Image (spheres, grey):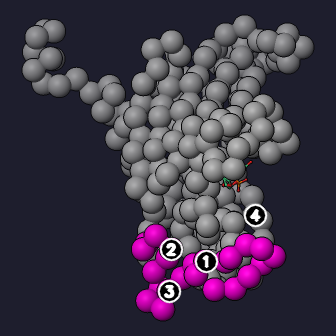
Amino acid sequence: MGNIGAKEVPTLLDAEGRRIDGRRLDELRPIQIRAGPLRQADGSAFVEWGANKVMAAVYGPREVHPRHLQQNTKAVIQCRYNMAAFSVDERKRPGIDRRSQEISKVIAEALDSVVFAEEFPRTSIDVYIEVLQANAGTRCAGLVAASVALADAGIPMADLLPAVAVGKVGGAIALDLKKEEDNFGEADLPMALVPQSGRLVLLQMEGHMTEPELAQALDLGVGGCRVIYEKMKAALRERYSVAPAAEEAAA
Ligand code: UDP
């Protein structure tokens, strides 16, 4: 235990290499993904990931508002990431702030790299991400929810976009940081992967790590993304698979 200002720094890694919640360094928090929970939206997804709870809703392709954002050759992807005022321990001021603007922008750009936007010129694909409960990694959870919601809306895409934050805690590279690790760790590195091409379409970093540590972090993150990818596909299969009995009844 040490002290930074008035805040007590928790022990992030014990002698056995276990993290604050008992996970190993390469272990994800539990993830549950549900495709299509919202009726009004064209597509939706709900992600529970550790203590994060994130809902995404997709509308479109539809008319562009505001009109001046319309593009003649492709759909514009507009994303609004919002953290509910009740989503964190210390009350967050409701409404748009710089952080939510930045996250909305990086998520929209990541989605733009997989959506076949040229198929829908002069339209908007609107992606709403509502963080109902936050415990670090919400931009990644938001991106996972958004890309499942886009698939649920039937928007053509090259691939889904699994995402995860890796980082450095207690001197070691760790997968999927939770809040204490994000707050008190040495580095936080959210990333999103296009699994079929191996391209990274979101990569941000806060803090410090060495070049070999960065290479290790990227490897760990890519592995984590591939696990999450399977869960995303399973959520969509569950939503759209027809039970054998129902199939027979419909025949
Ligand atoms: N957080 C908070 N209040 C805020 C912003 C963030 O309590 O106004 C917490 C929240 O748990 C969030 C975490 O800090 O998930 C890490 O935030 P960061 O900006 O690193 O983004 P994230 O890891 O959620 O993508």
- Between 84 and 173, the residue placed more toward the observer is 84
Q: Which residue is mark 1?
A: 10
The x and y percentages for residue 165 are 61, 60
Which region of the structure is painted magenta?
Answer: 1-23
Q: Which residue is mark 3?
A: 14
Name the amino acid, label 1: Pro
Nearer to us: label 3 or label 1: 1
Residue 227 quadrant? bottom left
The question of residue 4 being in magenta is answered with yes
Mark before the other along the chain sequence, 2 or 1: 1
- Dot label at residue 205: 4
Residue drawn 51% across and 42% down?
A: 53
Above or below — where is 162 with respect to 181?
above
Q: Which residue is mark 2?
A: 20
Tell me the CA gap for discs 2 and 4.
22 Å
The x and y percentages for residue 61 are 64, 14
Above or below — where is 11 with respect to 221?
below
The x and y percentages for residue 76 are 75, 23
Mark before the other along the chain sequence, 4 or 3: 3
Q: Are marks 4 and 3 in contact (CB under 8 Å)?
A: no
- The residue lying furthest to the front in this view is 6
